[in-house]
Amino acid sequence: FVNLHFPSGSSPFFGPVCHEVNHLPEAEVFKRLWATMSRGLDGMTFGARDLPYFSWRFVEHPEFVYRFIELKSFLRRRTIGLAIVRVDGEICQLSDIVAPLDDLPEILPALAAWSTQQGCKELHFSLTGRFARSLSPLALECNPLGVSITVSSLMPKDKVDLIHEAFWLTAGDTDYR
């Protein structure tokens, strides 16, 4: 896992628009978002995201309070993503997201601007190495967390590297109850 730090700032002019909502999106919208995202994860290992899972994981969490950010396209106002965040003091932690992976470079600055409006100094997003590397040019700082996917110590290094590169995991997958 790598923790990416995105600086606070203003929202990109024609970038996605963030709206905090107090509920998960309708089933059809969520299915569309997940179907688009999962196509970008073809050949990867990931936990499927669906409404019952998100409800259990984030709405019904016994300890943490999560906030739901609906991301809409600037011009069409169509929902292009759902971000799950947890605000902790001056840090906004992006715990999970359901959005097309190709849209993340536009979505992350919009979320960082939203976090600024919430009084946060930074947006953090912890995720596995391959995806963290692809987003690191956008980040202010990248910090390896020293947490890796468990594999057999007898496995050859090239196989271990393949496994580590094949996972989509975020902070939302690690705040165990």
Image: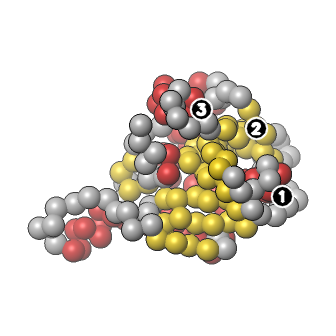
Q: In the shown orientation, is residue 7 left or right of residue 174? A: right
Going by the numbered disc 1, the residue's amino acid type is Ser
User: Which of the two marks, 2 or 3, is nearer to us in this view?
Assistant: 2
Q: Secondary structure at mark 1?
A: loop
x 25%, y 67%: residue? 160
Q: Which residue is mark 3?
A: 30
Examine the image and state in which quarter residue 36 appears: top right
Q: Which residue is mark 1?
A: 11
N-terminal-most mark, 2 or 3 = 2
Q: Position of residue 61 (x, y in %)?
A: 51, 31
Disc 2 residue crowd, few under 14, some 14–19, many 20+, Cα 10 Å = some
Disc 1 residue crowd, few under 14, some 14–19, many 20+, Cα 10 Å = many
Going by the numbered disc 2, the residue's amino acid type is Glu
Q: Position of residue 53 (x, y in %)?
A: 47, 30
The extreme right residue here reads 13
- The numbered dot on residue 139 is none
Q: Position of residue 72 (x, y in %)?
A: 76, 43
Mark-to-mark CA distance, 2 and 1: 15 Å
N-terminal-most mark, 2 or 1 = 1
Up-down relation of residue 156 to residue 89 (above or below): below
N-terminal-most mark, 3 or 1 = 1
Up-down relation of residue 171 to residue 129 (above or below): above
x 52%, y 59%: residue? 126
